[in-house]
Image (cartoon, rainbow, N blue to C red):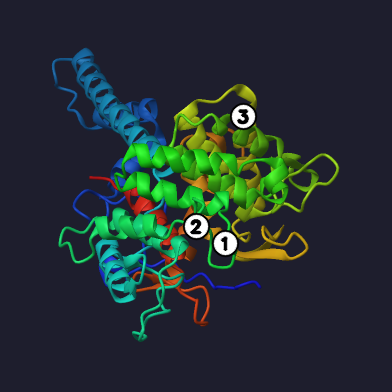
Amino acid sequence: MMLRQRVRPQVSRAGGGTPAPEPGLSPSPSGAPAAAPSRLLIWLGRLGAPATAFAVFQALLGVLPSQLAGEAARYGVAATAGVGVGAVVWLAAALLHARAAAGARSAVAAPAPSPVGPLPELMDGAYEALRRGLSVIDVPGSGPLTGWPHSLAESDPPIHPPVYPTAFGTAYGLHLLLDIAPLDGRIRVGEVAETLWRLRLPGGGWAARSQGGGARPEVSAIVLGALARAGADPRLLQSEVRSCEALLDSEHDAPGLANTYVVTNVLRGLLRAAPGSAALGGLRRVLVNGATADPVRGNHRCWGAALATGRRNPAPSAAHTARAVVTLDRAAQVLGEDERQRAVREEGLRWLLASGAANLENCQEDVRRPGQEDPLHQELLSVRHFTAAWVARALMTDGARRVAADGAGLPVWEAQLTAAVARVHGMQRGGVWRWDDGPMGHPVWMAYQGLSVLRRHALMVHRP
């Protein structure tokens, strides 16, 4: 299923709906347009300093009285005046050139103004949606659960009895809550974190609602990353990290380890929860080796839904390539990187830049695995990708601007980033992001990804 969304024209909401400034124009500090140089100065500058000096010399020589202490004095006064005016014109022209060059450099160096409205209003809207969608239910044998189902719309209007919180929805709700960081305490982080522990499966680990009774590494890693951000006890985390690492076995989960979504989720979650995990190096090698060259776009390496194995090369995907770039960037910050890892990550960025802003359509995939209880029965996990959010995050990673400057060019990078951010903003209303109009059409994870993109972009373009 594909969602097609028109990108609205770039508008600055803070100014009452007036068009946002164009990237190449630099307003004056007071907000008014910079004053243009006078016509006389422009005309003199076009003549050039030597020509101007000679013109002044000739004019004065013609008007000075001949009785001025002889012919030598007349020539001396005229020459002095001509040289003085010529020097002034030369200095003025140099100043104008310097100001123009500085303006051009700043227009290229600075990203375009943010195409979104006031960020605090979106954050307030997202927090109110979290409050409305919060499910509090007392489960016999498990105790009280405080969290979220998959979608913020599943309990709006309220349903009685409340919708059962899920590990996936509650983990992303906790991530979003920590990003918003409200101080009023109406949603208690500790209660949400405790709910995640209570949603742990009897054998350890976590799974999505559609994945049966066995733990899966991609969901376990997401929960562990959220718990680590919330300040969970490192000893409890370490025990679950070991359980998650045990799931990363090709004999146990070969389809998962061949899937870009699964590998990138596990890597990002473990980098948060256990940056010293011995499994991280192997997972990164799997992701790097899973890139494939795209002959259509300069043979730049990229990623598809499945990781490349040499025998088959999946169709390139902007969502999966952006996911991989973001994950490898985070791994580089935590673990460092060698030349090959850096080259593959940067080629992913070049592929995104070569793909153009049209590659922002949301997409969906199904991750199929043999059932854990019955291998003859397939387990199906439906995954939806917020492509614009992932592309924007990839284009805002460290070094993305430098990669663009060395290849496609900074204007291309700026235009694609602005288009991706505008699309992210256009898919929300009041801080709630909409995938579709169905009962699960307002995913918690989509709100987290959308708001984190807008927050990052606002910080990047901020100029005090």
Q: Nearer the viewer, residue 79 or 433?
A: 433
Q: Nearer the viewer, residue 182 or 429?
A: 182
- The residue singled out by tag 1 in the image is 213
As helix, strand or loop, the secondary structure at mark 2 comes to: helix
Which x, y percent locates residue 201? 48, 57
Contact check, label 1 and label 2, Cβ < 8 Å: no
User: Which quadrant holds residue 164?
Assistant: bottom left
Which x, y percent locates residue 234? 34, 37
As helix, strand or loop, the secondary structure at mark 3 comes to: helix
Question: Tag 2: Cα neighbours inside 10 Å, few (<14), some, or many (≥20)?
Answer: many
Distance between the alpha carbons at the discs numbered 2 and 3: 23 Å
Q: Which amino acid does label 2 sit on?
A: Ala
- The residue singled out by tag 3 in the image is 341
Q: Which amino acid does label 3 sit on?
A: Gln
Q: Looking at the image, which residue is at 50% across and 76% down? A: 440
- The residue singled out by tag 2 in the image is 389
Q: What residue type is labelled 1?
A: Gly
Q: Looking at the image, which residue is at 52% across and 52% down? A: 203
Mark closest to the chain's N terminus, 2 or 3:
3
Contact check, label 3 and label 1, Cβ < 8 Å: no
Which x, y percent locates residue 350? 63, 41
User: Which quadrant holds residue 103?
Assistant: top left
Q: Is residue 196 left or right of residue 128?
A: right
Q: Which residue lies furthest to the front in this view?
A: 141
Tell me the quarter of the image containing the N terminus. bottom right
Tell me the quarter of the image containing the C terminus. top left
Question: Tag 3: Cα neighbours inside 10 Å, few (<14), some, or many (≥20)?
Answer: many
Q: Which of 139 and 104 is in front in this view?
A: 139
Question: Tag 1: Cα neighbours inside 10 Å, few (<14), some, or many (≥20)?
Answer: some
Mark closest to the chain's N terminus, 1 or 2:
1
As helix, strand or loop, the secondary structure at mark 1 comes to: loop
